[in-house]
Image (spheres, grey):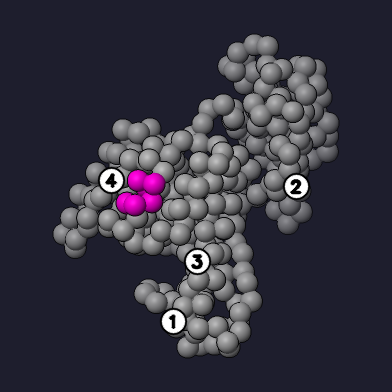
């Protein structure tokens, strides 16, 4: 089976015959359909579809394929996007002092589990530089003070533009990005945080969770928006804990969940498995496609 794929993400109002007409189009154009996933939202009366094709079957230009499919899309009133797996995205990782999420992303990338390039890591501290050095990723240290954050964000944007970055991953980056920054990368910034929000905001959330006697630890990965920590959720996970867990133990459990949830969210994005609808996401599960 080919690893060179063409992926269509489709959404529209629900109606009869959509899947038949779409798949018939690809069949008549000579494509082997590797996977075809669909979801009908009966509450919103909406239909969502992900089709993965073998790119070896493309015998003409990408532009011609888009033009031909657009005729089908217009007749069915589809919103659609198409992606090619050979077009690897450039991913920038932003971090602060903790390294667990950074290390996990770089390790999975080095093992070929994330279909992307990682041209740089940016941090407001030096703490994660050793991780970047270990994986031979260029590291940029941009220290932040109360007076220079606006200027440093401009420098971050300059670096992102220079490296043609497609996706920004906030791997426990403990600074609040401005609305201008976020709006420049809408649906292209993925953030990770513990799932205690909004109850335990700020520093030492796991200590306060211990003091409250929480019985579960979780993490949430989402697209960053103007509403802090309230963007469309991509992935979440949770693990039960007990009164026997210490603050350090809770922190370790939380760190493990955070890195797992973040890497999954990044992979879903890179593999084009996500359709954003309002403040929700449709995330098509991983199959062979």
Q: Quadrant of the C terminus?
A: top right
**Contact check, label 4 and label 2, Cβ < 8 Å:** no
Residue 5: horizontal and vertical position, in percent? Answer: 66, 28
Q: CA distance from mark 2 to mark 3?
A: 32 Å
In this figure, which residue is indicated by the disc labeled 1?
Answer: 207
Whether residue 231 appears in this view of the structure is no
Q: Disc 1 versus disc 2: distance between alpha carbons?
A: 40 Å
Can residue 59 be seen? yes
Per the rendering, the mark at residue 39 is 2
Provide the residue span drawn in magenta.
Answer: 129-134
Of residues 9 and 172, the one nearer the viewer is 172
| Circle 3 Cα neighbour tier, 10 Å, few/some/many (<14 / 14–19 / ≥20) | many
Q: Is residue 235 left or right of residue 50?
A: left
Tell me the distance, in whole angstroms, between the alpha carbons under discs 4 and 2: 42 Å
- The percent coordinates of residue 32 (x first, y second) are 78, 24
Q: Nearer the viewer, residue 56 or 33?
A: 56
Q: Residue furthest left?
A: 147
Dominant secondary structure (helix, strand or loop) of the stretch shown in magenta: helix
Dot 1 falls on a residue whose secondary structure is helix
Is 143 placed left or right of 52 in the picture? left
Disc 4 designates what residue?
140
- The earlier-in-sequence mark between 1 and 4 is 4
| Residue bearing mark 3 | 255
Camera-nearest label, 2 or 3: 3
């Amino acid at each position: 089976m080919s690893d060179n794929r063409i992926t269509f993400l489709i959404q529209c109002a629900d109606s009869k015959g959509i899947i038949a007409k779409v798949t018939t189009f690809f069949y008549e154009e000579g494509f082997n359909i590797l996977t075809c996933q669909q979801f009908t939202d009966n509450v919103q009366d909406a239909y969502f579809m992900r089709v993965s094709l073998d790119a070896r079957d493309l015998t003409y230009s990408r532009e011609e394929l888009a033009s031909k499919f657009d005729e089908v899309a217009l007749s069915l009133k589809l919103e659609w996007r198409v992606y090619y797996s050979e077009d690897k995205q450039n991913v920038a990782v932003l971090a602060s002092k903790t390294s667990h999420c950074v290390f996990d992303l770089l390790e999975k990338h080095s093992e070929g589990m994330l279909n992307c390039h990682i041209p740089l890591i940016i941090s407001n501290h030096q703490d994660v530089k050793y991780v970047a050095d270990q994986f031979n990723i260029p590291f940029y240290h941009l220290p932040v003070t109360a007076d220079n954050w606006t200027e440093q964000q401009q420098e971050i944007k300059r670096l992102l533009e220079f490296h043609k970055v497609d996706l920004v991953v906030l791997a426990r980056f403990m600074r609040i990005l401005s609305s201008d920054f976020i709006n420049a990368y809408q649906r292209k910034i993925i953030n990770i945080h513990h799932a205690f929000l909004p109850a335990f905001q700020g520093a030492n959330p796991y200590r306060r969770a211990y003091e409250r006697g929480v019985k579960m630890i979780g993490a949430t990965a989402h697209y960053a928006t103007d509403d802090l920590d309230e963007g469309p959720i991509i992935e979440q996970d949770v693990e039960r804990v007990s009164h026997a867990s210490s603050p350090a133990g809770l922190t370790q459990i939380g760190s493990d969940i955070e890195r797992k949830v973040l890497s999954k969210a990044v992979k879903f994005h890179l593999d084009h498995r996500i359709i954003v609808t309002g403040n929700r996401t449709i995330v098509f599960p991983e199959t062979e496609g």
